[in-house]
Amino acid sequence: MTSITPSSPQPSVSITQNILRRQDAVVAPGPGTRLGDLGGHPAMSIFRQESLSDEVNRESANLTTVAGGGMALQFKTSISSTTSSSTQTSSETVVHRMSGISVQTSGNGHEAVCSAGIHASSPEYLLQHPHQTYQTHQPTTQTTQPPHSVQQPHPIQQTHPLQQNHTIQSQPHTALHPLPDWTTGGPPEQKDNMAVYEGEMRKKDQLIEELMKLHPSHGLNKVRVGEAEEALRSDLAGMTVKVERLEQQVRDCGASVASKDSRLTELTRQLDAHRQEHARQAATIITLRQKLQEEESATVSLRANQRRGEFTVGALTRENRQQADRINDLENRLRTHLEERESAEQRSETAQKRLVELVRVVTSCLSLGDLDPRDAHEKLSTKLAELVQECARLRSEVVRTSEALEQQEGEAGAARQTVSRLVNELDDEKRTVEEQKIALEEYRKEVDDLKNKQRAMEEEVKSVRERLHNTNKSYNTTLEELHTVERQLQRAKDEVVVTEHRRQQTEVEGRGFLTTVATLLSSPDNRIAPDLQAVTDSIQGLVASNREEAEHVERLTSQVTSLGEQSRRHTELYETAVKRGRQSDADLHALATRCRQLEADQAAAEASREGVMIQKEKVERTLGRVVEALGLAEMGHEVTNDVEMIVCRCHQLSKLEGEKIVDKTTTVYQLQRKVKGLREAVERKDLHVDMLRRKLALTEDAARASRHLEEERDEILTKYKRQCRMMERLNGEVAETRLQLRDLKAQMTQAGEDKARLNQVQKKVDEMTTKIDELDVIRSRQQKKISHLKEQVKAQGEHVLEERRLNENSMEGVTQELALTKQNLRDITRRDKQLTEFRRTVVELLGMEGEAGPDGDYEAVCRLERVVGAHKELTDLSRRLDEITAPSRPSRLSPDQSFLDLSEELRALADDTNNQRPIPSRNSATTTTHLGITHTHRCPRPPSAHSSRTPSPTKRPSTDEDEDS
């Protein structure tokens, strides 16, 4: 492993880039040619080699002037370039480039330190531009980088402020680094410069000692000693100028160190003030802890009082429960008596209402009108007596009528059969109407069922829509999560690609670096393989060749050593001041944070203490009010705080109240109110105790948090001290090679972790993809189900609409039939009433008494026929008498036909209405003989659908008694 220590990061990189750009600007191959393709251009002339050698010498001199002569570049072995090889140069060019270079090789061959002349070599450029392609010739003062360069950043490892190893990594540069301002730089730049100078001084001393030990016989035969001496003289002149600049800079650093000392003194005063503040806060914490202990003791006493209160409350609760049971028994008895009384009152009111309703119904039935409630009973009694007498009279008439009806029972047999058939037909019609009503009800029920089914289907469709909406929401959420995972996966893939690219580039750069060093050390006669051992042997040979320059280096080293000692002292002072300042800032920040925490804890403890005092005052006021309410205030202040005495007094009062409850309902109510008040007081006390518990818990938590913070502070201080000691120990033990290996291992571990993370992300993506596929399948199924349900709902709705139309049509038909039936029934009822009224009128005209029936109707018709016949005979007799007495009088129309027609119409009406008497056939004739004149008339019979009836008996001839009547 090879390490090259730089004198300064920025100047070395800038000079090296300038040299290599000028070197690369000589040949301009095609755009596809890279740095390692120089073997394809064998036309590199000796002029180019000579010019490169001169350029190397000039830049070496400049670097010596800027960096102080003995400053070296340090390269980490982890930084490598591309696999391209460098330009083949002759041994003379190598000698020119290595002129003025002093190399130190350690015993194990793991580190090689070169002077500033190594800046002319190309590894620096290859590290900065691993993929740089050659462009056209540029002037030597050009500072822009060629295109097509790919740089990978790498962190700069720092081990100690005094031993900073500035590692030149592949960093992105869009322009050359400008030379730093050594005179106007800030304190961090001066600190870095001092550390670099001290390291360079130490390296230079070791280099001089090593060169003093080298044997003088190992030089190269082809080294141009004169040119080397000339270069060393120029280096000496440049270093003299640089020493003057460094002296001026050291003076500036002394002034800045003085200002830093004043600042350090001020920070020390602030630190003392903060320590005093910390002591005051510690005293405050101790005071708060004492207060907390007092609060804890008060809490213990409150808990004891609470236990006594709980015991008292338990006793009161038991007594209250007993009194409540007794009160419940009394309330149950009272409730039972009240219910019995209410039931009796309800029964009496019901009987009274029934009596009033009966009186009203009887009054309305008897048509008595509005009666006075006081005289209603007397009037009703009188009216009922009259009704009883009337009923007795009617019963006698009924007996007489029944005797007459018994004679006509034989004749009414056929009429009964006809009536029974009509009744049967009427029953059939009624049954038909009932069946139609039942069918109508069934239709209505079916319509209601269909409506219910429709509502259920609508609800089901609504639920399905809600489930679909929820499924869509979950699907959208899953899509968002999938997009997030895809973005994370893409980022992880990009990181893996970048890591893999870095790893490959690191490997390629390592191999390219060895190849470049081997190429630079090779000559046409002696080819050096790109191996670590071969490169080390070659460098040892070069070191042996430079032994003759040891004397010049020694003289220059003596001057640099003195400057290095001064710089080291200033650097140590500056580092000490900076370290103290940082430690003071850290202590100040920690103390400020601790102060804020302690102030917050103090405020919380003060608030909790005030809350406890307020609660204590509330408890004392409550006890005082209880003592005043119990009448114990005159016994002294000691009773106020004696809870047992208050409890005993409460027991006495509760017992006295319990004795008074036996006979007084109002006392029971008051006792209930007192018990309720005591319960509320107990609940309030429980709430108060819970609040005290919570406050005590908060106080304990605050104290615990303060103790925890103190422990954390002690742990942090211990860890800080331990880490300081560890840093001091590790700063002297850690080597650069181990840091390089650690970096490589860290990169490999990071790459492995990236791969594992990528695998996990891939697994998660696969799982999410599987879930998404399942959700898609579920969604498709749900969509199919929803579409199927929609079709079912649509078909069901159409079916329901069709059935509804059919039901509406059937309902309309049934309604029309029912309306027609009702109309027919109303017509029949009206005709029946008319016929009944006509029969009653005829019966009254005929002077008949008795109830309506087939026999009564037949008797009425017979009497009416006799009356009509007698009237006709009387009319004939009168007409004849008129003809005899007054022959010249004009004859009037004979009313025989009109009376005959009236008799026939009455008979037909009676037969059609009630069918109570057998009707003779249409062609049967009735013959009446009076005074030798025979009249023949026909009794018309209306058509009937019933069976044949018995013909009416022939009327007997009229006698003299009839004529007299």
Image (cartoon, rainbow, N blue to C red):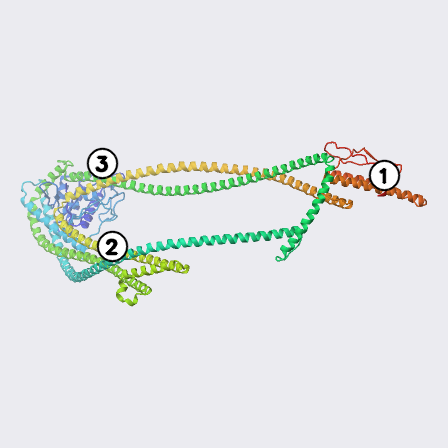
Q: Which amino acid type corresponds to the residue marked 2 in the rendered image? A: Asp
Is label 3 or label 1 in front? 1
Q: Which amino acid type corresponds to the residue marked 3 in the rendered image? A: Gly
User: Residue 625, located in which quarter of the rendered image?
Assistant: bottom left
Element under disc 3:
helix
- Tell me residue 229's x, y (percent): 9, 47
Q: Is residue 546 above or below residue 664?
A: above
| Residue extending furthest toward the right | 888
Is label 1 or label 2 in front? 1
Q: Which residue in the protein does label 3 denote?
A: 40
- Tell me residue 147's x, y (percent): 27, 44
Instruction: Compare marks 2 and 3 and give the one earlier in the sequence.
Output: 3
Q: Which amino acid type corresponds to the residue marked 1 in the rendered image? A: Thr
Residue 369 visible in the current orientation = yes
Residue drawn at the location 61% of the way across and 37% of the way down: 435
Q: Which residue in the protein does label 2 denote?
A: 701
Q: Which mark is residue 959?
A: 1
Q: Is residue 179 above or below residue 906?
A: below
* Residue sitting nearer the eye, 436 or 447: 436
* Residue sitting nearer the eye, 401 or 430: 401
Element under disc 1:
loop
Q: How many marks?
A: 3
- Tell me residue 469's x, y (percent): 43, 43
The span from disc 2 to disc 3 (Cα, nearest Å) is 80 Å
Instruction: Compare marks 1 and 2 and give the one earlier in the sequence.
Output: 2
* Residue sitting nearer the eye, 105 or 795: 795
The span from disc 1 to disc 2 (Cα, nearest Å) is 139 Å
The span from disc 3 to disc 1 (Cα, nearest Å) is 176 Å
